[in-house]
Amino acid sequence: SYTTAAPQKLREPPRSHRCLAMMNVFRFAGDMCHIVSFILLLQKIVRGRSAAGISLRTQELYAIVFCARYIDLLWNFASMYNVILKVCFIGASLAIVYLIRFGSPQKNTYNPDVDAFPVQYLIVPCAVLGVAVCHDHRSPFEMVWAFSIYLEAVAILPQLFLLQKQGEVENLTSHYVAALGAYRGLYLLNWLYRYFTEPDYMQRIVWVAGLVQTALYCDFFYHYYQSKKGGMNQPVKLPV
């Protein structure tokens, strides 16, 4: 979820006064879909004892995203709900990376040869954008926050490229990616709702990054829908 302590002149009244106003059914549903995506992935890795078909590079990018964005846990309190989500996202993303890298037998099921997307072409441009296009160039945290927004928008790319190489997506993995896409789609509705219900609500960086991220899921969702018409247990077929 997108949560940070931005300059007050850009993002309305103090966060503690806006906590309830920011919450709506779309944001809550989006957060729940995000949590479900973690549960599905951990179920595959822990209970299924396999990391096959999972991109470690995508998971490492997500770990960077959450650690960078939620470093404000050290000084910013918006609500207990907010704190719990931040801790869960950081903890789950780090646990997933650890299990794929060092877990047994999970590390033996991970294939780095098919997970070869050059992530430096994602991290470096996002870091440059974070410095160049942010809400407050005097605040290092705002630059780090903007970097995390840009990086999350493209962090799914290594996973999508891996699945494209395989051509067929195992059931739990397909549900995991679908849950992530649903989270993003619901957050678009959340932003739209807030735009029409909150005075002066404006988050251009978040909106643009969110639209880019949603666009990346469109092709997968098309094939997910076509495959699941035959039953929810059917694997997703992707063009190679």
Image (tube, grey):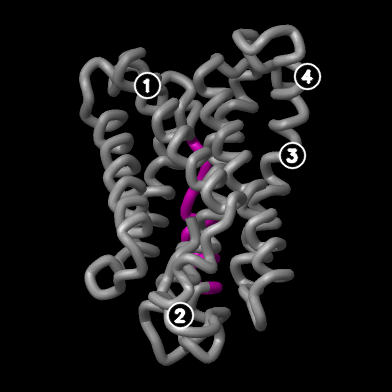
* Residue at figure coordinates x 36%, y 16% from the top left: 50
Question: As rendered, which of 226 and 144 lies closer to the eye?
Answer: 226
Res 104 seen here = yes
Q: What element carries label 2?
A: loop
* Left or right placement of residue 199 versus residue 88 in this view: right
Q: Sequence-wise, which precedes: disc 4 or disc 2?
A: 2
How packed mark 3 is, by other alpha carbons closer than 10 Å (few <14, some 14-19, many 20 or more), is few
Which numbered disc, 2 or 3, marks the residue closer to the eye?
2
Which residue corresponds to mark 2?
6
Q: Sequence-wise, which precedes: disc 4 or disc 1?
A: 1
Q: Position of residue 178 (x, y in %)?
A: 60, 31
Which residue corresponds to mark 3?
218
Q: Does the magenta stretch include residue 109?
A: no
Asked whether disc 1 touches disc 2, contact meaning CB atoms under 8 Å apart, the reply is no
Q: Sequence-wise, which precedes: disc 3 or disc 4?
A: 3
* Left or right placement of residue 46 versus residue 37 in this view: left
* Residue at figure coordinates x 62%, y 40% from the top left: 181
Q: What element carries label 3?
A: helix
Q: How far apart are marks 4 and 1 (CA)?
A: 25 Å
Q: Is residue 118 magenta?
A: yes
How packed mark 2 is, by other alpha carbons closer than 10 Å (few <14, some 14-19, many 20 or more), is some
Q: Distance between the residues labelled 3 and 4?
A: 13 Å
User: Which numbered disc covers residue 226?
Assistant: 4
Which residue corresponds to mark 1?
43
> Magenta part of the protein: which range?
116-129
